[in-house]
Image: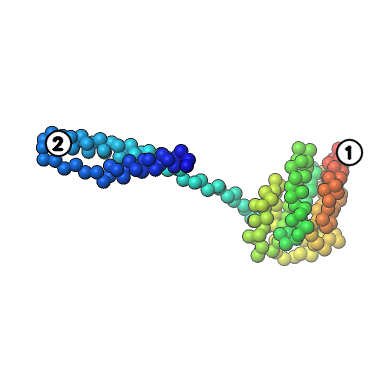
């Protein structure tokens, strides 16, 4: 049994012992002893109560705090262009994903690892969820599970074709999809469908290398 639990039980027994004990006497000396006894019991109970108050927080099991996950900020076609302007001057990888997309679930953790690995070299990564608003709970669970080190957004409902074409002409919205932008803001590459780690490593290194020319 843990030390704090034994201490808590001992203190509890002390409180119970002195809470039920009573002294009756008609003699003067006995009265003084009774008063002294009550005083001693009062002090003992007081100490026991203080002890209980001290050990209770340590004896009680501490539930782990769950990390609060905020809903990603919604973004539309205009917002996407503003996003690219925001990251202008930095090598940028933008990945589109959804909770219902099985290849996305396989690829996302890998991209998170690559984001950590290449961040010291200046790589910026942004994720955009293509989930519907009805899947926001699943979206929160997805982000809580993978704990991404990069910012994520979610596409605003409606105007799918307009949004897709604003990202890349000819893209039909199939997932996963990842696009690479040089420091100039120009799109210099993409991976449509699930890519291997080697594919992404090569694309990222080319992206980082393009900024040094």
Label 2: few (<14), some (14–19) or many (≥20) C-alpha neighbours in 10 Å: some
Label of residue 213 in the image: 1
Whole-percent x, y for residue 90 in the image:
79, 43
Residue, far right: 213
Q: Is residue 5 visible?
A: yes
Q: Secondary structure at mark 1?
A: loop
The Cα atoms of the two marked residues, 2 and 1, are separated by 100 Å
Above-or-below relation of 64 to 141: above
Q: Is residue 187 visible?
A: no
Q: Residue at x 26, y 38 (%)?
A: 41
Label of residue 30 in the image: 2
Above-or-below relation of 105 to 3: below
Colour mode of the rendering? rainbow
Say whether marks 2 and 1 touch (CB < 8 Å): no
Question: Count of labels shown?
Answer: 2
The answer to whether 111 appears left or right of 205 in the picture is left
Whole-percent x, y for residue 128 in the image:
73, 55
Q: Quadrant of residue 50?
A: top left
Q: Residue at x 19, y 42 (%)?
A: 23
């Amino acid at each position: 049994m843990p030390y704090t639990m034994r201490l808590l039980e001992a203190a509890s027994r002390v409180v119970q012992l002195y809470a039920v004990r009573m002294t009756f006497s008609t003699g003067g000396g006995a009265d003084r002893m009774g008063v002294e006894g009550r005083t001693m019991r009062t002090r003992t109970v007081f100490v026991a109560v203080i002890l209980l108050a001290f050990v209770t927080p340590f004896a009680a099991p501490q539930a782990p705090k769950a990390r609060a996950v905020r809903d990603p900020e919604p973004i539309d076609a205009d917002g996407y262009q503003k996003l690219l302007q925001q990251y202008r001057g930095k090598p940028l990888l933008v990945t589109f994903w959804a909770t219902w997309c099985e290849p996305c679930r396989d690829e996302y953790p890998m991209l998170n690892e690559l984001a950590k690995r290449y961040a010291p070299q200046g790589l910026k990564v942004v994720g955009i969820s293509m989930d519907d608003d009805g899947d926001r709970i699943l979206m929160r669970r997805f982000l809580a599970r993978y704990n991404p080190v990069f910012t994520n957004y979610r596409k605003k409902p409606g105007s799918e074709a307009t949004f897709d074409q604003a990202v890349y002409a000819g893209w039909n919205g199939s997932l996963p999809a990842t696009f690479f932008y040089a420091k100039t803001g120009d799109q210099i590459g993409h991976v449509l469908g699930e890519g291997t780690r080697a594919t992404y490593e090569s694309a990222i290194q080319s992206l980082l290398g393009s900024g040094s020319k």
